[in-house]
Each structure stands twice: as structure tokens, then as C-alpha cells.
């Protein structure tokens, strides 16, 4: 890497940080309990809008995993999400009416809060429909993983987005608050992903899965990126560059081994395709607040008219993390 | 007699306290060394909490950075204190604050009582061990290391390089043969006292102070001077990963640890409550004199190291993306590629799948779609037959297919109409077994009723592409197993060729084929080639075909077109 390129990336990082600093004024605290955060706590950061129905299970899932504090940005929900969150003892909430799109899909807000409260902590940045899975997550709490990463001098941990879907119509089984969404969306694609390398930021670019198969079969290059690096030992100088797909400085994106070995990695079970999806897709189509002119939602809307089934004969039913590790979607690396 | 425990603690002091009390309850005195990095206040609280125990002492505190002299100094001081304060200690066991005794203390005492003169310390000469980190073995004893390997890698590496260049070498004190090994030892009072009271200790200390990672070599080397009986094995179960960092034990290792019959394990995660409560509560029942047997744990951790350094062949994923030539297996399994066979034989695919039991696909890289076996539109792993999706990354399509179908032999057809350049990926893959009948693409043309001008153009194009494909197969970079016949060669003795291919797939080794696939009717094919030639398009890939095969000899019943029959 030449000096010029290095400097360019540095400027880019500074730009994202400056943007986050500017956008901090859009955030109004609803309940700030960050004084409860202790030195070694693992934190969850999340932006959401009208996800009240998902929250009870979301909070339960991550609390049981060993997360000590949640930091939310509520993008003007109208379904009582903010009230629900404000009532939780381990949650801090900020509210904003401003545009999700113009804050780079919430990343500016996240970068600011990460910088302000995440410094020195292991921070997990996820969406309310994403469930983090890591090796041994059924027997070891999240702090076991972060302690190990720390001892191994690893600063970032990747977890590929794994789209989960139900068998049959997406809206066939209505989702109830508090229910484990994986009971409904229990299926996934195990082996149709493509991996490319982004040589500038050194991250991998993963595409594929049911969304590429069903919605983007005719233009796979437009299929959504599935590579994510949600768990980072945050430093106030860091910044997420594009969603949680990649970070700056770019060394944090090297979550993969180039010499044949496997580094440890996890997965984010993405339970977007529930009964709540159609409504959400229609709303997002109207708001046009999502990535690349919401082209993803345009594709969904046109395909959803025909009532697609994401499930196919070779879909795999989710059992546990060991299954994902055997299928090669994640790896234990040298954590045993 | 009893054994004395020297404990080096630096974090999770509440666990150190718990373990120390476990030792003293069984009558073993404990000397604790607390790292200098622990704040004074915390140390004082810790010391006060343990003040009620008459068998616990605290030794002088040192800075114990990884790989520095401080660890040796701490062990020396603590051992000295142990020997002078507790007269009846016969063995001294060095542990860390993250160590956990797995068996009743009495079993350890009995075990050592049965071996009163034995020193348990892993100690091997540098030439014989592969565990060195940073590529330094002999040199760690002959160079100087003023810079920290962990914090100042750049200076460390360059200083080593500089010393190599100018040929700097320290003198090893007379009488010492450098030995290395795990830092967790158990020495007899005699050996330890001899080491600590050696008149030349000052010289040795001065020397080892500048050796790299002295805690792995100081006692290991000096023990060899005094001990009458060294068992080169640590009584502490301690596994290291590929970076020389200890593996950590968690609650889910409980059964493994229990079955290992080791006396002490390192290192335990400080929140592994179940391990601490299980192993620190008294165990009813008979004491056993079992030898430690960490075989199973060894295998699990060896596998983890292997996974981290070599990975699973043929897997491309979020945390494994090998550079070219570092894949350790481009694809997950051996597979066979056939070019020209479906064209020459009428029933090649079903025949092959019947004879070999392999999964036989059609043209996987055909322009319209991926022709999976049995006409399926999805394959294992929800791999789609969509041509656009496939051609977005044809190489990953191939590696995905082979990864998803591990354990089942895959065969597929290729041809000049396949996705361009995929032949190149296949050619570079040692797992590929490619068989080509060159020029067989002319048969479908020959059988079709299209206008001759069309045929001529297409033949020219296909011949050009196939020539390129053959070039890549024959290139010096090609690593696949290849067999290339011209069509004429192949037809001479098809059975022989097919037998070789089937043997290679290897499901029924060394069995003669009893049933052969049927070759299509080739009457008039020679004339067809001649026609192409007459039109100025020179077909050469199929070898020499006589213009009129019938001219070779009179056919007995020439009325019926007769296929070439393959006979055994």
C-alpha cells in the first residue's frame, strides 16, 4: 500500500468520524443509563424503527448471552418501541426523527455512540432481526469469547449474515412478540455463497443465499452483501465504513486467513423473512430510506407479488452452531 | 513430608485465593507471588483475606512480563521462601493463578512420595523441539533481546537480524547445555536447593537474564546439572496453540479434564464456575494412582491448531480465503471431468453412474443452465442451476459444488460451449481428473440437419475454443490429471481408455468392465469431416479419420447402419 493510498484511507476515516460528530446533534437521549456500564461489559448497539414486536426476544437472547448493556437509536418509531425500551433497566435509548438514509443508514449515529460509549469495550453492532451465533455459544457466554479474542490479540470478529426463512409462504405463520423467530424461519442456504476480496479495504465481499437465488438471479452483482464484522473491541478512532460490512482502519477487516488456515468466526442469523416482512417491505418502499434507492425492497416487492417460496429441496434446517461449523459457514479457528 | 506450591498470580485473584485454600486444606503450604502490575491496594486486600491461613506466604513481587526474566526471579524468590519456611516440603510444584488441581491433592502427594528423587520438568535440547516461537531456537541462547517481542515486534525482529548479520554470539557459561520446556515444573527439594545455592548462580543469572523467554529454559537447563532422575514431562496439563499462547479450559471441557487424570490443568477461564466448583470440592471414593493420560485433550487441541494453520481443504468462507496456491486443496474432493464423451456415446451419463456409483452431472457449465444430475434445478447446499448466478463466479460454483457434496464422487461434462475459462480453474486443480476426446464436438454437428454454412462456422469456432482448452490443460501450470485422446485414437480402442478412467474413479478397483456404453452411429462421419475440409475449414482435433470408413472393409449387412460396438 502506497503512502498516498494510506493517506486517502485516513482521510476517509476522518470523514466518517467527522460526520458522526456532526450527526450527534440529531440524537436526543430518551433514557441514558450509560453510567451503569462497567469496565469489562460487552455492549450491544442497535438502530431500529417500529420493531417493538421483535424486541422482547431480542433483549432476552442477548441478555442470556452475557451482554450487559444495550444502546439503541430509535428512528421515530410509532409502535411504542421507545417506551418499551425506556422501561428496561439495562438499556439506553436515543431518539431521532432525522433521515435514516442521510445518516448513512444509521451508521453515523452508531459511529457516534460507539465513539462516545464503546471505547475500550467489546461492542456488538446488530439489527433487531439479527441473532449472533459464535462457536460454543451454547456452553460459553459471550465474555468467554471476548476474553479469548483479547488474549489472542484479535480486535474484530466476523459473523456472516445468514438469511433464515420459513418453509412455505413467508406470511403463513404469524410471529408473536417474545417468540423465538427461528421457530418459524428455521431454514437457510448452506452452500451457494460467493466470496470476493475488496483490495482497497481488504474486506471480503460475500453474496449469495436465498436473496441472490430468488430476488437477484438475473443480476447477482446487485445481491446484498452478507459479510459482517459486528463484534469489535472498539477504539474511539475506529469507524464503520459501510453498514457493519467493513471498518476503518482497514486492518480490522482482515478477519480471514490468507494462508490456508481458518480464523474463528460466527454467524448472524438474519430473521428478516417473517410474517412482519411484507408490511415492512411496503413501508420501506414508500419511505425509500434504504440502501441504493431501496433497490433491494423494489426487488422484493415485485417478487413478493407472486408469493415466492424461498424454501427449496436442499434448504438446510437450523440446528445449532456446530451444524454451521461443519457446513463451513463459520469456524472455531483455534478456539477449542 | 508434603509438597509446596509456588503460585504465580496476576489476574483473577479471587480464583487464586480459592485454589490456594484448596491446597492448604490438604496440608500443602503455598507461596504466592503477585505480579507487580496488581495495584498495591488490591494486593493488600488480597493478602489480608488470606492472612488467617498459616500455610500461606507472599514472596517479593516482581514485574512478570511474558518472556522476561521477572518470571524466573519470581519463581526463585518464591521457591527460596518455600524451602526456608517449610522444612518438611520435599517437592516444590510451580503453578500459576489460573491453574486448577484436577485430582485430590492426596493423590498428588502419594504419587510424588512414590518418586522421592524424581524431578518432573519438561526439558529438551533446543535441536530436538519444534515448539519454538518466532523461529528462534539455538539463537535465543546466543543473542541479546532488549526489545519486547509482543510490544515492539519491529525492533525485536530487526535487532535479531542485525545480530545475525554481524555474527554476534554470546558465550554460554561453561558446563551448561541449553534445554527448554514447559515452565510448569515440580522439582525435589534437593535439586531446587542446589540450583538456588549454587556458587555460580550469579553467573548463571546474569547470563539467563538476557536469554529470550528464560522461564522456559532457566530451570530446565540447570536441573540437568544436579538432578539424578529427570522425567521430562510436566505434571501440569497445559496446551499451547500455534502462537505459543496457552489454550483455555471452559465448563464444557469438564468431562475431558476429568478423564485426563492429570494432576493440574492450565489455564482455566476465570468464570468457569462449574470447573472450579467440581474440582475444588472433595471427591468421595478411592484414591487412584493412575498415570496422567491427556491423550484425548491433546488430540482436540492438535486439531484446533491444524484447523487454524491448515484449515479444511476446498473451503472458501468468511474466515478462510486463501491466496492462490495456498489453498491446501483448491477443491474439497477429487472429481472427474469428461469432454466429448456424451457426444460420442449415446448413454454415457447413466452408464457411468451405474458402473461407478458416482454422481454424474451433464454439462454443468452449459450456456442455458447447469445440467445437474437427474435434471434437478437445485443441488446440495441450495446451489442453483441458474446460468447467470453460476457465471457470476464459476470457480466458486465449482468449489461450492464439491464442498457441498463431500463424500460423494462428482463427475460432470465439459465442452467448448461451456463457460469460458472454467477449464483454466479446473486445469490448475490437482483434484481434477480430466478426460478429453478432442474433436467430439463435431458429432452433434454431423448429426444435425442445419445448413452447411452454419455448421462450418460453428465448427471453426468450437475447434478454436477446444484448442485453447487443450492448451490450458497442457500448460506447465496445469496440475490436474489429464488424459487427452483424439477421437480417432479413442475409437481404435475405446474399452481400454474407459477401463482406465473407471479404475481411476476407483469405486470398483481392478474389476473388468462387463458392460460398455454404446457409441453413436458414425457412418458418414469421415465424409462429413472431408466436406468441412473441402470448404476450407480444417478440422484437426479429431485425428485422422478416413473419408469413408466403409471403404476399410466390406460390411456384411451394409443395408442397416451399424453402430460401432465395443467388445470386451
Image: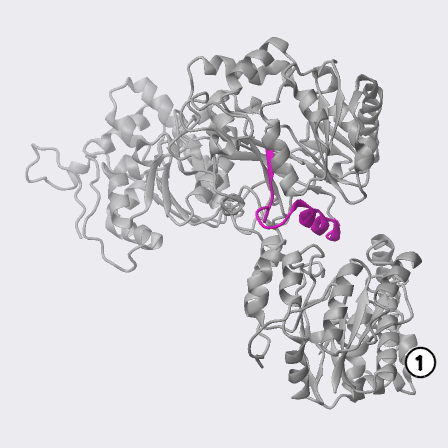
Q: Residue furthest top?
A: A286
- Residue B176 position, x and y percent, is 82, 83
Q: Residue furthest front?
A: B52
Pointer 1: residues within 10 angstroms few (<14), some, or many (20+)?
few
- Residue B28 position, x and y percent, is 75, 78
Relative to B556, is A48 above or below? above
Near-viewer residue (A158 or B169): A158
Q: Quadrant of residue A266?
A: top right
Relative to B514, is A94 above or below? above
Left or right: B536 in relation to B202: left
Query: Can residue B550 be seen here?
Result: yes
Q: Quadrant of residue B292?
A: bottom right
Relative to B51, is B422 above or below? above
Q: Quadrant of residue A111?
A: top right
Q: Quick check: is B293 in the magenta stretch? A: no
Relative to B286, is A1 above or below? above
Query: Can residue A48 be seen here?
Result: no
Kindly identify which residue carries mark 1. Answer: B202
Magenta residues span A130-153
Left or right: B160 in relation to B125: right
- Residue B487 position, x and y percent, is 30, 40
- Residue B557 position, x and y percent, is 6, 37
Left or right: B534 in relation to B238: left
Near-viewer residue (A202 or A84): A84
Q: Report the residue at 25% width, 47% height from top.
A: B494
Q: Quick check: is A152 in the magenta stretch? A: yes
Near-viewer residue (B327 or B97): B97
- The quarter of the rendered structure image containing the N terminus of chain A is top right
- The quarter of the rendered structure image containing the C terminus of chain A is bottom right
* Chain containing mark 1: B
Secondary structure under tag 1 reads: helix
Amino acid at each position: 500500500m502506497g503512502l498516498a493510498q494510506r493517506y486517502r484511507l485516513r482521510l476517509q476515516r476522518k470523514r466518517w468520524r467527522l460526520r458522526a460528530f456532526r450527526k450527534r446533534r440529531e440524537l436526543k437521549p430518551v433514557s441514558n443509563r450509560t453510567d451503569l456500564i462497567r469496565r469489562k461489559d460487552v455492549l450491544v448497539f442497535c438502530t431500529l424503527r417500529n420493531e417493538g414486536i421483535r424486541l422482547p426476544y431480542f433483549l432476552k437472547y442477548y441478555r442470556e448471552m452475557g451482554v450487559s448493556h444495550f444502546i439503541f437509536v430509535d428512528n421515530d418509531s410509532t409502535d411504542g418501541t421507545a417506551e418499551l425500551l425506556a422501561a428496561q433497566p439495562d438499556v439506553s435509548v436515543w431518539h431521532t426523527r432525522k433521515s435514516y438514509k442521510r445518516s448513512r443508514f444509521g451508521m453515523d449515529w452508531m459511529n457516534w455512540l460507539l465513539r462516545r460509549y464503546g471505547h475500550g469495550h467489546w461492542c456488538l453492532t446488530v439489527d433487531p432481526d439479527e441473532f449472533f451465533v459464535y462457536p460454543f455459544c451454547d456452553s460459553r457466554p459471550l465474555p468467554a469469547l471476548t476474553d479469548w479474542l483479547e488474549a489472542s490479540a484479535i480486535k474484530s470478529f466476523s459473523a456472516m449474515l445468514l438469511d433464515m426463512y420459513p418453509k412455505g409462504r413467508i406470511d403463513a405463520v404469524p410471529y408473536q412478540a417474545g417468540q423465538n423467530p427461528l421457530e418459524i424461519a428455521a431454514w437457510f442456504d448452506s452452500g451457494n455463497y460467493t466470496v470476493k476480496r475488496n483490495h482497497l479495504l481488504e474486506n471480503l465481499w460475500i453474496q449469495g443465499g436465498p436473496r441472490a437465488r430468488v430476488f437477484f438471479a438475473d443480476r447477482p452483482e446487485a445481491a446484498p452483501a452478507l459479510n459482517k464484522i459486528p463484534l469489535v473491541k472498539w477504539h474511539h478512532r475506529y469507524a464503520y465504513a459501510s453498514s457493519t460490512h467493513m471498518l476503518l482502519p482497514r486492518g480490522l477487516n482482515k478477519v480471514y486467513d490468507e494462508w490456508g488456515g481458518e480464523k474463528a468466526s460466527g454467524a448472524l442469523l438474519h430473521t428478516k423473512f417473517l410474517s412482519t416482512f411484507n408490511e415492512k417491505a411496503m413501508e420501506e418502499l414508500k419511505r425509500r430510506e434504504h440502501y441504493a434507492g431501496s433497490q433491494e425492497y423494489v426487488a422484493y416487492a415485485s417478487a413478493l407479488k407472486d408469493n415466492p417460496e424461498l424454501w427449496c429441496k436442499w434448504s438446510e434446517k437450523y440446528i445449532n452452531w456446530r451444524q454451521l461449523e461443519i457446513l463451513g459457514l463459520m469456524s472455531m479457528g483455534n478456539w477449542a | 513430608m508434603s509438597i509446596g506450591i509456588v503460585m504465580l498470580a496476576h489476574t483473577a485473584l479471587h480464583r487464586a485465593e480459592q485454589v490456594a485454600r484448596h491446597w492448604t486444606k490438604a496440608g500443602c503450604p503455598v507461596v504466592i507471588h503477585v505480579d507487580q502490575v496488581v495495584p498495591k491496594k488490591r494486593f493488600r486486600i488480597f493478602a489480608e483475606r488470606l492472612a488467617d491461613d498459616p500455610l500461606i506466604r507472599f514472596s517479593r513481587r516482581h514485574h512478570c512480563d511474558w518472556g522476561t526474566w521477572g518470571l524466573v526471579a519470581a519463581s526463585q524468590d518464591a521457591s527460596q521462601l518455600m524451602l526456608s519456611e517449610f522444612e518438611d516440603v520435599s517437592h516444590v510444584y510451580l503453578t500459576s493463578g489460573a491453574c486448577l488441581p484436577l485430582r485430590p491433592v492426596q493423590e498428588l502427594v502419594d504419587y510424588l512420595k512414590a518418586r522421592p528423587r524424581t524431578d518432573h520438568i519438561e526439558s529438551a535440547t533446543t535441536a530436538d523441539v519444534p515448539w519454538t516461537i518466532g523461529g528462534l531456537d539455538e539463537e535465543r541462547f546466543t543473542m541479546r533481546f532488549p526489545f519486547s517481542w509482543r510490544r515492539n515486534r519491529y525492533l525485536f525482529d530487526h535487532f535479531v537480524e542485525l545480530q545475525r548479520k554481524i555474527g554476534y554470539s554470546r558465550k554460554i557459561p561453561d558446563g551448561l547445555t541449553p534445554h527448554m520446556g514447559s515452565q510448569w515444573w515440580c522439582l525435589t527439594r534437593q535439586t531446587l536447593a542446589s540450583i538456588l545455592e549454587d556458587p555460580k548462580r550469579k553467573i548463571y543469572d546474569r547470563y539467563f537474564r538476557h536469554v529470550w523467554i528464560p522461564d522456559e529454559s532457566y530451570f530446565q537447563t540447570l536441573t540437568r546439572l544436579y538432578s539424578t532422575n529427570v522425567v521430562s514431562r510436566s505434571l501440569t496439563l497445559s496446551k499451547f496453540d500455534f502462537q505459543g499462547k496457552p489454550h483455555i479450559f471452559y465448563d464444557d471441557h469438564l468431562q475431558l479434564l476429568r478423564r485426563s487424570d492429570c494432576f493440574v490443568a492450565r489455564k482455566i477461564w476465570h468464570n468457569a464456575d462449574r470447573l472450579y466448583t467440581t474440582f475444588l470440592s472433595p471427591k468421595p471414593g478411592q484414591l487412584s494412582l493412575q498415570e496422567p493420560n491427556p491423550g484425548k485433550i491433546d488430540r482436540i487441541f492438535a486439531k484446533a491448531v491444524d484447523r487454524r494453520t491448515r484449515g479444511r481443504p476446498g473451503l472458501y468462507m468468511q474466515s478462510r480465503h486463501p491466496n492462490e496456491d495456498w489453498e491446501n486443496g483448491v477443491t474439497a474432493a477429487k472429481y472427474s471431468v469428461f469432454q466429448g464423451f456424451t457426444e460420442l456415446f449415446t448413454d454415457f451419463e447413466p452408464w457411468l453412474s451405474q458402473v461407478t456409483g458416482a454422481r454424474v452431472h451433464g454439462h454443468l457449465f452449459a450456456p442455458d443452465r447447469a445440467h445437474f444430475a437427474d435434471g434437478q434445478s437445485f443441488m446440495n447446499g441450495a446451489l442453483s442451476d441458474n446460468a447467470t448466478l453460476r457465471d457470476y463466479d464459476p470457480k466458486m460454483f465449482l468449489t461450492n459444488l464439491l464442498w457441498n457434496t463431500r463424500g460423494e464422487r462428482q463427475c460432470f461434462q465439459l465442452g467448448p460451449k461451456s463457460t469460458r475459462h472454467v477449464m483454466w480453474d479446473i486445469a490448475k486443480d490437482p483434484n481434477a481428473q480430466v478426460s478429453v476426446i478432442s474433436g467430439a464436438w463435431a458429432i452433434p454437428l454431423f448429426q444435425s440437419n442445419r445448413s452447411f454454412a452454419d455448421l462450418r462456422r460453428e465448427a471453426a469456432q468450437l475447434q478454436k475454443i477446444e484448442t485453447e482448452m487443450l492448451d490450458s490443460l497442457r500448460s506447465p501450470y496445469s496440475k490436474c490429471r489429464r488424459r487427452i485422446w483424439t477421437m480417432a485414437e479413442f475409437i481404435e480402442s475405446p474399452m481400454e481408455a474407459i477401463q482406465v478412467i473407471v479404475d481411476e474413479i476407483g469405486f470398483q478397483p481392478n474389476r473388468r468392465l462387463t458392460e460398455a456404453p454404446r457409441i453413436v452411429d458414425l457412418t458418414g462421419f469421415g465424409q462429413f469431416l472431408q466436406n468441412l475440409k473441402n470448404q476450407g475449414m480444417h478440422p484437426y482435433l479429431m485425428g485422422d479419420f478416413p473419408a469413408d470408413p466403409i471403404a476399410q472393409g466390406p460390411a456384411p449387412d451394409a443395408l442397416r447402419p451399424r453402430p460401432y460396438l465395443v467388445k470386451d
